[in-house]
Each structure stands twice: as structure tokens, then as C-alpha cells.
Amino acid sequence: MKEKILHQFGKLIVRIYCFFAFKIDVKKTEKLPKGPKIFVANHPSTTDPFLTIILIKDYVSILIKDILFKVPVFGLYLKHAGHIPVSLENKRLAFERSKELLINGKSVVLFIEGDVSPAEGGFLKPRTGAARLALLTGAPIIPIGFELNRQKVKHSFTKVRKMIEQTHWYKHGRYSITFGKPIYFQGNDQDHSFVQKITDLIMREVIRVSLQSKVRLLKVCTQ
């Protein structure tokens, strides 16, 4: 109950901020299926996870770098709202927590590149976590493509408990987001070549919908 209340509170705050800061264009290819889902997105800015809170109707848990959970006040919100810290030293914990939530009927959001995309554009090498979760739980993959005005992304360094973290905030401007069709997978999650094949397929779909977002964004900007 506490997690849902905090989730709704966070959604309200983000919605208010986004109303003033962004011009958001969202396209959903088709109606999403009921039940747990794995939302898999590209990651052009640090702002992306917060947008997913208001773009997805489901109560979702987002995989977020553990250092943000150490930020005073904000970190407590992330923890008690049910989001999932990802530690570079032990990524398995985040994976197991995600699997547990999916098995219990809840949805998760993860960024397939594992970090913010290159500032100059393009994508990082995809991680295999989304593919393995889909194979283990049977939950569908929902690809999400974010696109924004990269010239307005503010790159800076933030100190959190003696640790330096680079951030890439997009504070205002146009945001274009595309939700792709649900994709279902079956197979052996221990077959590494098969998992890599599925990962590459998911990444291609994320790139495809992100390019759709980019086309719409460019079209608006050139009008």
C-alpha cells in the first residue's frame, strides 16, 4: 500500500513538472496486454526514467543505478516507491528482484543499454537481462523509443556520498516517445547464443521505435 501511494505521489509531481517543462508526443502502436510486462527502452538522458512513471498506466518498478538511492530524500522515495537499485558490483540482485516482481504479476522498466546512450547519438551495446527475464517469466517485451533535442541535454558531474556520478539532464524541450508492439519469447535462458540472439532482436526493435520517435521530432522541429 505504501509503495502504491508513493508511486502515485511521484507520478503527480512528475506530471506537474512535465506539463511546464516538456512538449510530449507519445505514440502507442497498439493496446498493451494485461498482466506483467517488461518495458525495454533506450536511454538518451537521465530524465527518461521519470517520464516512464507517467507514460505507463501500470504500477511499475524501474531499474535505476543504485547511487541515486543514496541521494538524500530522493533516494528514500525511490526505495519506498518500489523501484530497483542496480549495483555494478552485484547486478544479479536487481535481476532476481525483477524476476520476482514479474512472477507476482508486476511490471518492470529497464534500459537495455545499461547506461545513458552516447551524447553524440547512437546506442551502447545491449545487455542480456531483458531477454533472460522474458524467457524465464513469459512476460512480453514492450520496446520503447525515446528521442529528444540532444543539444539541450545538460551534461554535468554530481557528488553523492563522496562518489562522482555523471548526469545528463534534459530539463525542457520536446520529447518524442514510441511504444512498439508486444513481443513474446520462449526458449532456454541458459543457451547463451540464443539469449544473445533474442537480445539483438529486442535491441533492433528498440532502435526501430526510437527512430520513429526521431522522425516525428524532426518533422515538428522543421515545420
Image: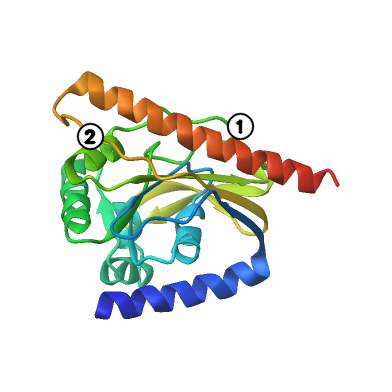
Q: Residue at x 46, y 29 (%)?
A: 204
Which label number is shown at residue 169? none
Q: Position of residue 16 (x, y in %)?
A: 58, 75
Quadrant in the picture for the N terminus: bottom left
Among the 4 quarters of the image, the one containing residue 92: top left
At label 1, the amino acid type is Glu
Task: Name the residue: 48% across, 43% down.
Answer: 43
Amino acid carrying label 2: it is Gln
Q: Residues within 10 Å of mark 2 (few under 14, many from 20)?
A: few
The disc placed on residue 120 is: 1
| Of the image marks 2 and 1, the number of the one nearer the N terminus | 1
Q: Are marks 2 and 1 in contact (CB under 8 Å)?
A: no
Residue 132 appears in the figure: yes
- The quarter of the picture where residue 17 lies is bottom right
Comparing labels 2 and 1, the label whose residue is closer to the camera: 2
Where disc 1 sits, the SS reads loop
Along the line of sight, the residue nearer the viewer: 159 or 109: 109
- Using residue 146 as the reference point, say whether residue 164 is left or right of it: left
- Position of residue 24 relative to residue 17, above or below, is above
Q: Secondary structure at mark 2?
A: loop
How far apart are labels 2 and 1 at the CA level? 36 Å
Residue farthest right in this picture:
223
Residue 143 position, x and y percent, is 44, 43
Residue 128, image x, y percentages: 28, 32
Residue visible at 16% across and 23% down?
A: 191
Does residue 60 sit above or below 128 in this rendering?
below
In the rendered image, residue 2, in percent from the top left (x then y), is placed at 26, 80
Q: In the image, which disc is placed on residue 186? A: 2
